């Protein structure tokens, strides 16, 4: 792989992947609709000649095609956060598929736990073969991985506020540090034998949200406080925000089922939860203090 294109490069996972690719001496075309995020990437990698940024709509074929000229692999991440719109994601994947077919580039898709349950089989199934790869990921955490349930909970810990229990905090799940996820995806993309298959990324073992928040509490020297959402509050939440029910239901359904959707891949080394949570919380604290 000599040149890669990262679609939605301004996302938390996109930034982590750009960093991994540049570190591996791969030329990167960072594609995003946000000029602000592209400028942030340019600033972060100002000392490297390997980064080129391109602003455009991820669902616009002509803009994608112009940016993808000469790339070997196109990466895109979907449903890694709870705010993805299924209709927009579908149109983006269709556009990326068509550009990969036209240019001859390989296509690597990373899909997260917020993938709608009814799209698990169909979201990428019509683009298969030796030049594509579909990778499933546990819930991501890390300084750049926002708009997730665990990030919301960690933010409350950093703010010294109680955490509303949207999910059962005692259920043990797999979580994956965002930098590890980016590294694993890059490693798979560099393996010719990995294409034409589905994969799922392994985190650092099962752990509960309560245990993760205890680790976060040790950094801020405070015991996490929990605030259950009672029946009427949950009903009110779901009445005001219909997507909330779908998000919570599919999260509970999909969080521990990715193992049945491909071959396991965990890399050689993964970040221990304690190290990852400490790094994440310190980064969130620094960001919070810089605002005040």
Image: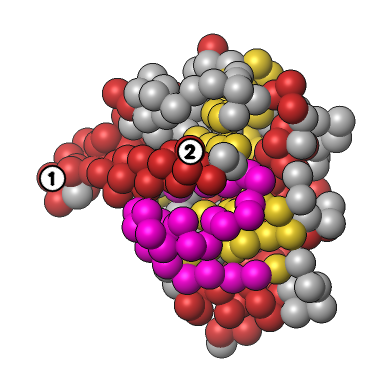
| Label annotation for residue 276 | none
Q: Mark 2 points at which residue?
A: 101
Quadrant placement of the C terminus: bottom right
Q: Is 79 in front, or is 96?
A: 96
Depth check, front residue: 14 or 53: 53
Observer-side mark, 2 or 1, equals 2
Q: In this view, does 156 lie to the left or right of 199?
A: left
The crowding category of the residue bearing disc 2, from other C-alpha atoms within 10 Å (few below 14, some 14 to 19, many at least 20), is few
In the picture, measured across the screen, residue 148 lies left or right of residue 192, that is: left
Q: Measured from the top left, where is residue 69 in percent x and y?
A: 57, 57
Q: Name the residue under label 1.
A: 239
User: Is residue 280 found left or right of 125 in the rendered image?
Assistant: right
Say which residue appears at 71% left-offset and 75% top-offset.
44
- Measured from the top left, where is residue 51 in percent x and y? 70, 68
Residue 92 to residue 16: above or below: above
On the question of residue 89 being in view, the answer is: no
Q: Is residue 61 above or below residue 261?
A: below
Q: Do the residues labelled 2 and 1 touch (CB within 8 Å)?
A: no
**Residue at horizontal 53%, vertical 45%?**
103
Residue 105 in which image quadrant: top right
- What's the residue at 75%, 79% (across, down)? 46
Which secondary structure lies at badge 2?
A: helix
Q: In which quarter of the image is residue 38?
A: bottom right
Q: Which residue is drawn at 76% across and 67% down?
A: 50
The N terminus sits in image quarter: top right
Q: Does the magenta stretch include residue 267?
A: no
Whether 59 is among the magenta residues is yes
Q: Give the range drawn in magenta.
A: 52-81
Residue 33 on image: x %, y %: 42, 68
């Amino acid at each position: 792989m000599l040149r890669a294109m990262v679609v939605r490069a301004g996302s938390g996972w996109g930034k982590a992947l750009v960093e991994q690719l540049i570190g591996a001496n791969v030329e990167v075309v960072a594609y995003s609709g946000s000029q602000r995020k592209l400028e942030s990437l340019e600033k972060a990698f100002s000392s490297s000649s390997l980064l080129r940024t391109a602003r455009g709509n991820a669902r616009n074929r002509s803009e994608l095609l112009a940016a993808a000229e000469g790339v070997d692999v196109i990466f895109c991440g979907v449903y890694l956060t709870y705010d993805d719109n299924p209709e927009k994601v579908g149109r983006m994947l269709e556009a990326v598929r068509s550009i990969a077919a036209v240019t001859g580039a390989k296509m690597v898709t990373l899909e997260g736990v917020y993938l709608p349950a009814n799209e698990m089989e169909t979201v990428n199934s019509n683009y298969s073969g030796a030049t594509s790869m579909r990778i499933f990921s546990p819930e991501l955490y890390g300084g750049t991985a926002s708009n997730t349930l665990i990030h919301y909970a960690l933010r409350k810990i950093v703010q010294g506020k109680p955490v509303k229990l949207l999910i059962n905090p005692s259920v043990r799940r797999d979580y994956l540090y965002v930098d590890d996820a980016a590294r694993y995806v890059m490693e798979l993309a560099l393996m010719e034998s990995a294409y034409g298959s589905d994969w799922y990324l392994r985190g650092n073992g099962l752990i509960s949200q309560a245990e993760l928040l205890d680790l976060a509490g040790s950094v801020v020297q405070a015991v996490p406080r929990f605030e259950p959402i009672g029946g009427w509050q949950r009903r009110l939440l779901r009445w005001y925000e219909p997507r909330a029910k779908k998000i919570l239901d599919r999260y509970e359904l999909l969080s521990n089922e990715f193992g049945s959707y491909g071959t396991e891949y965990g890399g050689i080394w993964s970040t221990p939860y304690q190290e990852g949570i400490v790094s994440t919380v310190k980064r969130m604290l620094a960001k919070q203090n810089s605002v005040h």
